[in-house]
Amino acid sequence: MKSSKSILLAVALIALALLGAALYLQHVKGLQPCPLCILQRYAFAIIAVICLVSASMPDSIRKASAAIGILAGIGGAATAGWHLWIIAHPSTSCGRDALEAPLNALPTATLLPSVFKVDAWALCSAVYETILGLSIPQWSLLWFVVLIVILAKVLFKRSKTGDFE
């Protein structure tokens, strides 16, 4: 079985690749991010940073980091689920007025506006063309579930002696 270090590095690379895909859709395809899209980006970024940092730590810290990554993944999955619910019920507001200002006031939105700034005109209920049959929030939800499962394997991985590492 692969070491938890290599698994965490793989999870970080997947999360960074997903952020790259989001940036491609935004800057090349012109799909502007709504507040819920930005929250999902934060969740992927948190997972990536936690996994990158914890990969160089002892196993006990890796397990704790995997747990934190799982929590970020659950938050991201919940946000993606809420995003899907809003798309299915377009009369529901995504909270653009409530979420836009606080998200854009965060230091990350100021330092990296091309990644974390909410577009003032982007609506969470907007339906874009699907990618391989799935909407963007569906892809996001799918990847959060995949990352949660992988991180859960790191968290509950037993050592060769049968004890926790």
Image (spheres, grey):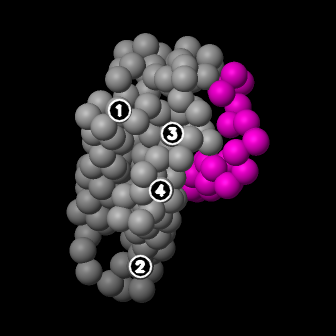
Taking 112 as reference, is 77 left or right? Answer: right
Image depth: mark 2 or mark 4 in front: 4
- Residue at which label 1 appears: 30
Taking 56 as reference, is 93 left or right? Answer: right
- Residue at which label 4 appears: 135
Image depth: mark 1 or mark 3 in front: 1
Q: Residues within 10 Å of mark 3 (few under 14, many from 20)?
A: many
- Residue at which label 3 appears: 37
Quadrant of the snapshot with the C terminus: bottom left
Question: Do labels 1 and 4 touch, CB within 8 Å?
Answer: no
Question: Do labels 2 and 1 touch, CB within 8 Å?
Answer: no
Between the residue at mark 1 and the residue at mark 3, the CA separation in whole angstroms equals: 14 Å
User: Which residue range is magenta in the image?
Assistant: 73-99
Among numbered discs 1 and 4, the one appearing first in the sequence:
1
Among numbered discs 2 and 4, the one appearing first in the sequence:
4
Between the residue at mark 2 and the residue at mark 1, the CA separation in whole angstroms equals: 46 Å
Secondary structure state at the residue bearing disc 2: loop
Between the residue at mark 2 and the residue at mark 3, the CA separation in whole angstroms equals: 36 Å
Residue type, label 2: Arg
Query: In this orientation, does residue 119 appear?
Result: yes
